[in-house]
Image: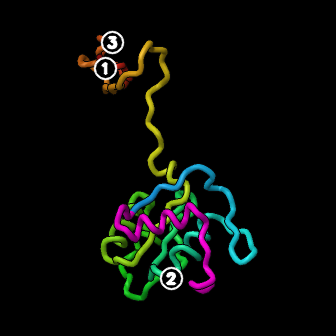
Amino acid sequence: MSNAARLLPEWAEDLRRRYLRGEASMFVLHGNVYDSQVVDKKLVTLTDFLADVLFKETRDTIAIYNVATGVRFTKRAPTVTGLEDLLLGPKDRVLGALERLLIQSMRAAVIFEYAEALAPTATPPSRPTPIARPWSRCTGGRSCPRSSAATTSSCWWPRT
């Protein structure tokens, strides 16, 4: 698709402008992220839209990470090396390898699918409280305000 013929949806044009103005270099897309985008009279997923339309002309390397399926490259510069942790290593090393990719190349993009699986919400168990307050977590033992038993493994309690 040529740049002259490329018309972006309003949200994508806004994202592009904010990036070019230097307002931000990372974005979290939320809302209707499972909606399809129309490109050349075809419906494509958001991930494909980002990789094949928004980033294709401006990035030398485009990596897509999904916790379940791992890393795949839609575009990879020949100068990008040392990514064995991404493709062959254990999953706990992937985020560090993606960080190295972004540091070593100014023209790289990483798309995280299902980002909520990377850092799931760690909300404490719901407890009826009259007002919203911060919660604290203890690992049990004598310092636990909820129990004097040293066998308590962990609990949550509202901070006062």
Question: Is 102 above or below relative to 152?
Answer: below
Label 3 sits on a secondary structure element that is loop
**Residue in front for this viewpoint, 87 or 56:** 56
Q: Badge 1 is on which residue?
A: 159
Quadrant of res 50: bottom right
| Residue 23 location, quadrant | bottom left
The foreground one among 121 and 94 is 121
Q: For the residues marked 2 and 3, what is the alpha-carbon distance in whole angstroms?
A: 60 Å
Q: Is residue 99 above or below residue 7?
A: above
Q: Position of residue 41 (x, y in %)?
A: 75, 75
Q: Secondary structure at mark 2?
A: loop
Mark 2 and mark 3 residues within 8 Å of each other at the beta carbon: no
Q: CA distance from mark 1 to mark 3?
A: 15 Å
Q: Which residues are magenta?
A: 1-25
Residue, x 40% and y 57% (percent of image)? 92
Question: Would you say 101 lies left or right of 61 here?
Answer: left
Residue bearing the label numbered 2 = 57
Q: Which mark is residue 147?
A: 3
- Residue 81 visible in this rendered orientation of the protein: yes
Q: Earlier in the sequence, mark 1 or mark 3?
A: 3
Q: Residues within 10 Å of mark 2 (few under 14, many from 20)?
A: few
